[in-house]
């Protein structure tokens, strides 16, 4: 009897905390790129390393 009520109480607590856990996981996965710099910075090539441009497109 005591074990069944403990399991029921634990399940109720977990069900209440589950939405909060999902939110934390969602935020963590969304902002992972800002912490680990998933997108590298852009670097412009200098004039000395680029080949001559023959045609300019608009």
Image (cartoon, helix red, strand yellow):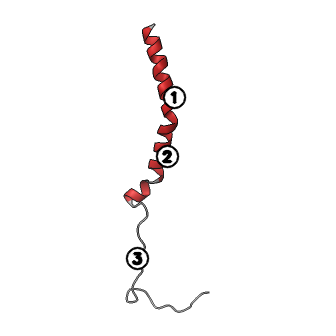
Q: Residue visible at 43% across and 9% down?
A: 2
Residue that numbered label 2 is attached to: 26
Quadrant in the picture for the C terminus: bottom right
Q: Is residue 40 above or below residue 9?
A: below
- x%, y% of residue 8? 49, 17
How many labels, in total? Answer: 3
Residue that numbered label 1 is attached to: 15
N-term mark: 3 or 1: 1
Alpha carbon distance from label 3 to label 1? 48 Å
Alpha carbon distance from label 3 to label 2? 31 Å
Label 3 crowd bin: few (<14), some (14–19), many (20+), radius 10 Å: few
Question: Which tag is nearer the camera, tag 2 or tag 1?
Answer: 1
Q: Residue furthest top?
A: 1
Q: Nearer the viewer, residue 16 or 3?
A: 16
Kindly indicate whether the residue at mark 2 contacts the one at mark 3 (C-beta within 8 angstroms): no
Label 3 sits on a secondary structure element that is loop
| Tag shown at residue 43 | 3
Q: Is residue 34 above or below residue 1?
A: below
- x%, y% of residue 48? 37, 89
N-term mark: 3 or 2: 2
Q: Quadrant of residue 56?
A: bottom right
Kindly indicate whether the residue at mark 1 contacts the one at mark 3 (C-beta within 8 angstroms): no
Alpha carbon distance from label 2 to label 1? 17 Å
Q: Residue furthest right?
A: 58
Q: Residue visible at 46% across and 7% down?
A: 1
Label 1 sits on a secondary structure element that is helix
Q: Is residue 40 above or below residue 19?
A: below
Q: Residue visible at 46% across and 17% down?
A: 7
Q: Residue visible at 44% across and 88% down?
A: 51
């Amino acid at each position: 009897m005591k074990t069944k009520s403990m399991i029921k109480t634990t399940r109720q607590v977990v069900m209440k905390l589950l939405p909060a856990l999902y939110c934390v996981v969602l935020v963590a996965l969304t902002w992972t790129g800002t912490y680990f710099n998933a997108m590298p910075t852009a670097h412009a090539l200098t004039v000395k390393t680029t080949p001559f441009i023959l045609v300019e497109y608009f």
